[in-house]
Image: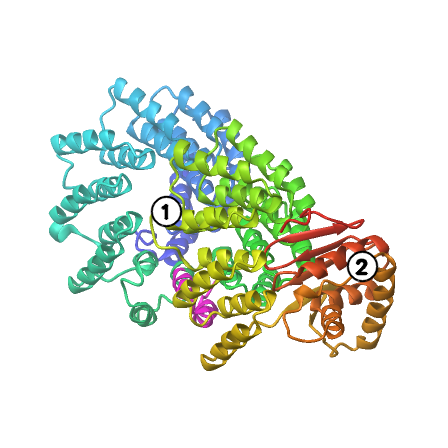
């Protein structure tokens, strides 16, 4: 009595006062602790019972096996299984059911199956336990086969079995089977059972049958509880109907049903159909803010709205932060490109004693793809993932491929790609785009052809990479072929980005008329990215008329973007039309449009240094300019002649040469040469496109200095080595 009333101390006192204790007495105490979820104390009772020389009976074994199942202490369970066999209780159905339950909760399906098949007398609990365990372990096909075997065995279907069978339909998305079960439930008189109706409702929502689900929900009337309301709200969310989910959430509160942690966690994903701040206020009032599930959902909602500050406040309020909460916060910083914030959270996580999982590593490695992240940081997190045993996890290896490809180490990206045991579309696309951006067009197409041989799914991102590879490598015919393949064979509708790639392909080849014809034939109005591509090409080919058209369209779409004004003024300067250039510059002043300043970054000994043209702020500025002067002499000896066409100012040629010699990438390279040991590759990042004269100079520097120099400009990577560039001078 005391144990059933959760007064375990009084129950223990009564037990202690008893002089004669038999197996029933001990088992009652053990069962009491088990019912009150006091697993460790229950196991102590069992141990004391054995030490006291009391032989367990079948009910004792069934109870202690249930305790061990809850504790997932399968090693102790195997020892108890041995005792069961010695005592001859393995033929008792209740004991066999407990063994099945214990093994399945520990994921030991084979051992559970052996026990099940050896049972002489199976009851409804045996079948239901085995089927439910297979479902829990993700073995849906095996569970379905066993369900049919049970039907053939003539076992009567109970409420529990119906719930399990409906859950099986849900996981398999077997709508026809679910409807059949629905019919049998109605015939057998179980239709009013709340658990069965909720399970059927969830099954319909998972199969996308929201009307049927809502009919069931509507018929529940007064028997609706927070579980059924939450299941229905979740169904609308899963079927991408957030407005209905939000309306149902409001109706739930009007009907006086108090949301629980699962309700809040579910409905938070419905914003902006709900007021995030109002729901947050409710969560605070109901004291769910400290719940890991609610807190994580809340911070994720704030991250999606771009409010990382509020997300961080929510994160601090979570009582017991699990790895999901930590990973969500880290991912929030990573999505914003805040590498410092992401690294700070990762370090706090490690200090708190929580072990990072594969999703944590995936998030932090993705954060390292930004230009603001240190190259070494990505390598360090790669090393940490190896030590933690997560480097081969699917999401981690995909993140590593992307990170190395975006940070200039395409060789390492390829090594990881080759080692991947399974690859998703992201991995394939990352390698194609990576090779394209690094100037290895043929290698990119080779990866694509391997995809085709395997009949793998492709999307717009795949073809953006493929056509970009053709563009950067000057493969005009191949680019046209793959575009036609995408549209005609795979029936993938081209996006704005795809059309931009095709415009770029034609423009780089000097086929501006064909590029314009493509723009005119697009099924939707050309966006800024298309006009910017055409304007840049007009600048290269000095087509003033087309450049003016592209600039007018670009300015109308993005009047505050400096790119259109700068490209147009550069086009006028390149053609010697200084008067028109002055007009464009004046227009920028009137509209208060600021030109983006060119910067170049270099990382040396885990510290990042930035330079702009003519920069003298660096402590080693004198040494940097001395190195540039030395290089200038050696470059002229190697036959270099400055191409002053890239100086878009109306000044004397001598002054133009001086301007060229002080471009930001040259300062960064000069610093790299004096700050690093001979033979060490130099990596530069530039926020603007590298000019043609600097490209020539860097090729020569790589040869006379014997250094590999990697430059990542706003368009692509350039790998300079031995006087050559990976772009083949076509960029």
Report the magenta residues as a range: 297-320
**Mark 1 or mark 2, earlier in chain:** 1
Residue 142 position (above or below residue 30) = above
| Circles 1, 2 touching at the beta carbon (< 8 Å) | no
Of residues 18 and 562, the one nearer the viewer is 562
Task: Identify the disc placed on residue 521.
Answer: 1
Residue 264 percent across, percent down from the top left: 32, 60
The answer to which quarter of the image holds residue 351 is: bottom right
Residue 358 percent across, percent down from the top left: 55, 48
Left/right placement of residue 509 relative to residue 229 reads right
* Magenta-span inclusion, residue 309: yes
Secondary structure beneath dot 1 equals loop
Q: Is residue 282 visible?
A: yes
* Magenta-span inclusion, residue 136: no
Residue occupied by mark 2: 640
Residue 383 position (above or below residue 687) = above
Of residues 466 and 216, the one nearer the viewer is 466
């Amino acid at each position: 009595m005391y144990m059933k009333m959760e007064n375990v101390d009084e129950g223990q006192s009564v037990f202690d006062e008893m002089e004669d204790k038999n197996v029933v007495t001990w088992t009652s105490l053990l069962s009491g602790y088990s019912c009150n979820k006091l697993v460790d104390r229950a196991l102590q009772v069992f141990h004391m019972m054995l030490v006291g020389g009391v032989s367990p009976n079948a009910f004792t074994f069934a109870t202690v096996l249930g305790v061990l199942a809850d504790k997932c202490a399968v090693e102790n369970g195997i020892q108890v299984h041995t005792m069961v066999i010695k005592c001859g209780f393995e033929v008792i159905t209740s004991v066999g059911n407990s063994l099945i339950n214990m093994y399945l909760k520990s994921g030991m399906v084979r051992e559970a199956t052996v026990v099940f098949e050896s049972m002489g007398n199976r009851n409804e609990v045996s079948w239901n336990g085995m089927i439910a365990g297979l479902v829990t372990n993700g073995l849906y096909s095996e569970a379905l086969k066993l369900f049919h075997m049970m039907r053939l065995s003539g076992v009567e279907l109970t409420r529990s079995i119906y719930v399990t069978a409906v859950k099986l339909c849900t996981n398999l998305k077997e709508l026809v089977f679910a409807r059949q079960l629905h019919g049998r439930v109605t015939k057998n008189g179980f239709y009013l059972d709340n658990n069965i109706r909720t399970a059927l409702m969830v099954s319909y929502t998972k199969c996308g049958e929201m009307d049927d689900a809502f009919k069931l929900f509507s018929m529940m009337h007064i028997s609706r509880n927070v579980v059924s309301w939450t299941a229905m709200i979740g169904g609308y969310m899963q079927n991408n109907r957030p407005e209905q989910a939000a309306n149902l959430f409001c109706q739930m509160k009007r009907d006086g049903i108090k949301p629980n942690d699962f309700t809040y966690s579910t409905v938070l994903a419905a914003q902006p159909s709900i007021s995030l701040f109002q729901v947050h206020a409710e969560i605070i009032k109901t004291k769910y803010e400290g719940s890991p599930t609610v807190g994580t959902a809340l911070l994720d909602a704030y991250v999606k709205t771009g409010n990382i500050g509020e997300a961080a406040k929510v994160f601090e309020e979570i009582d017991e932060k699990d790895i999901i909460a930590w990973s969500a916060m880290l991912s929030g910083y990573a999505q914003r490109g805040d590498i410092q914030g992401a690294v700070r959270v990762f370090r706090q996580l490690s200090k708190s004693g929580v072990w990072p999982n594969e999703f944590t590593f995936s998030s932090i490695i993705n954060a390292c793809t930004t230009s603001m992240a240190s190259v070494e940081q990505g390598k360090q997190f790669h090393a940490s993932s190896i030590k933690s045993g997560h480097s081969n996890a699917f999401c981690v290896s995909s993140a590593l491929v992307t990170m190395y490809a975006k940070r200039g180490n395409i060789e390492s990206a390829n090594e990881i790609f080759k080692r991947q045991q399974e690859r998703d579309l992201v991995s394939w696309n990352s390698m194609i785009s990576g090779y394209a951006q690094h100037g290895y067009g043929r290698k990119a197409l080779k990866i694509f052809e391997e995809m085709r041989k395997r009949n793998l799914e492709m999307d717009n991102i795949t073809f953006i990479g493929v056509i970009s590879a053709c563009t950067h490598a000057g493969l005009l015919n191949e680019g046209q072929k793959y575009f036609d393949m995408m549209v005609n064979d795979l029936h993938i509708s081209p996006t704005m980005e795809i059309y931009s790639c095709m415009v770029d392909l034609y423009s780089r080849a000097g086929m501006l008329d064909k590029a314009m014809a493509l723009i005119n034939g697009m099924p939707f109005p050309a966006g800024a990215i298309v006009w910017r591509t055409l304007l840049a090409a007009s600048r290269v080919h000095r087509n003033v008329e087309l450049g003016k058209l592209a600039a007018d369209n670009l300015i109308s779409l993005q009047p505050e973007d400096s790119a259109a004004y700068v490209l147009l003024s550069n086009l006028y300067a390149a053609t010697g039309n200084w008067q028109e250039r002055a007009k464009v510059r004046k227009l920028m002043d009137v509209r208060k449009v600021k030109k983006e300043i060119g910067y170049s970054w270099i990382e040396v000994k885990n510290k990042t240094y930035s330079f702009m043209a003519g920069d003298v702020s660096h402590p080693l500025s004198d040494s940097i300019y001395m190195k540039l002067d030395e290089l200038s002499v050696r470059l002229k000896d190697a036959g270099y002649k400055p191409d002053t066409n890239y100086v878009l100012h109306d000044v004397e040629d001598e002054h133009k040469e001086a301007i060229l010699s002080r471009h930001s990438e040259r300062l960064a390279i000069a610093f790299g040469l004096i700050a690093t040991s001979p033979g060490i590759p130099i990596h530069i990042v530039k926020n603007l496109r590298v000019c043609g004269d600097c490209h020539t100079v860097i090729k020569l520097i790589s040869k006379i200095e014997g250094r590999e120099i990697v430059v990542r400009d706003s368009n692509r990577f350039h790998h300079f080595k031995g006087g050559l560039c990976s772009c083949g001078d076509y960029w």
